[in-house]
Amino acid sequence: MTVQKIRKNDTVIVIAGNDKGKTGVVQSVDSGRIVVQGINVKNKSIRPNPQTGEKGGHRSVERSIDISNVALYDTQSKEKVRVAVKTLDDGSRVRVNKKTGKTIDGEAK
């Protein structure tokens, strides 16, 4: 099983695109594209639906961005993190900060 380098609820920094330099929390990861809170926000027009009581208008929606345009962000050291995958003695695989060698998450998936 592969270990994803960026997962849901990780803090990331955008390294390319219109929102370069902004940070946010990952809301979802799906096949190479991720949705980050407050990043790539677009306006969407909504038609009124009287059956559900929904009013029409414009809503702000976060759109997905490519996973290659973000990097994991360390909130303590305030810098982006390069991620490696390390196999432990018991056979589980964990994410590791390449610079410091510390594990990013305690549990393996």
Image (cartoon, helix red, strand yellow):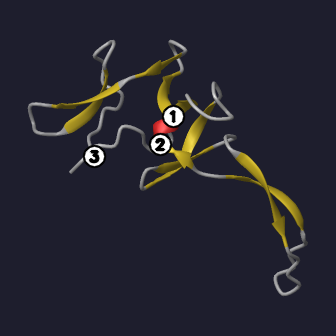
Residue 21 x %, y %: 63, 24
Residue 109, numbered label: 3
Q: Residue at x 34, y 43 (%)?
A: 4
Disc 3, SS? loop
Element type at marker 1? strand
Q: Looking at the image, is 74 positioned above or below residue 66?
A: above
Q: Looking at the image, do the residues carrying marks 3 and 1 touch, with CB atoms under 8 Å apart?
A: no
| Figure quadrant of residue 45 | bottom right
Q: Residues within 10 Å of mark 1 (few under 14, many from 20)?
A: many
- Examine the rendered structure and indicate whether residue 94 appears above or below residue 97: below
Q: Which residue is mark 2?
A: 67
Name the residue beneath numbered marker 1.
Answer: 70
Identify which residue, 26 or 63, lies in the foreground.
63
Residue 10 seen anywhere in this rendered image of the structure? no
Front: mark 3 or 2: 2
Classify 91 as above or below 49.
above
Residue furthest front as drawn? 17
Q: Position of residue 42 (x, y in %)?
A: 76, 51
Q: CA distance from mark 3 to mark 2?
A: 19 Å
Identity, as a three-letter code, of the amino acid under mark 2: Ile
Q: Nearer the viewer, residue 71 or 96?
A: 71
Check disc 1 and give the amino acid type: Val
Q: Residues within 10 Å of mark 2 (few under 14, many from 20)?
A: some
Amino acid of disc 3: Lys
**Residues at marks 1 and 2 touching, judged by CB atoms closer than 8 Å:** yes
Left or right of 72 in this view: 54: right
Assess disc 3: are there few (<14), some (14-19) or many (≥20) residues with their C-alpha within 10 Å of its C-alpha. few
**Could you say whether the residue bearing mark 2 is in a helix, strand or loop?**
helix
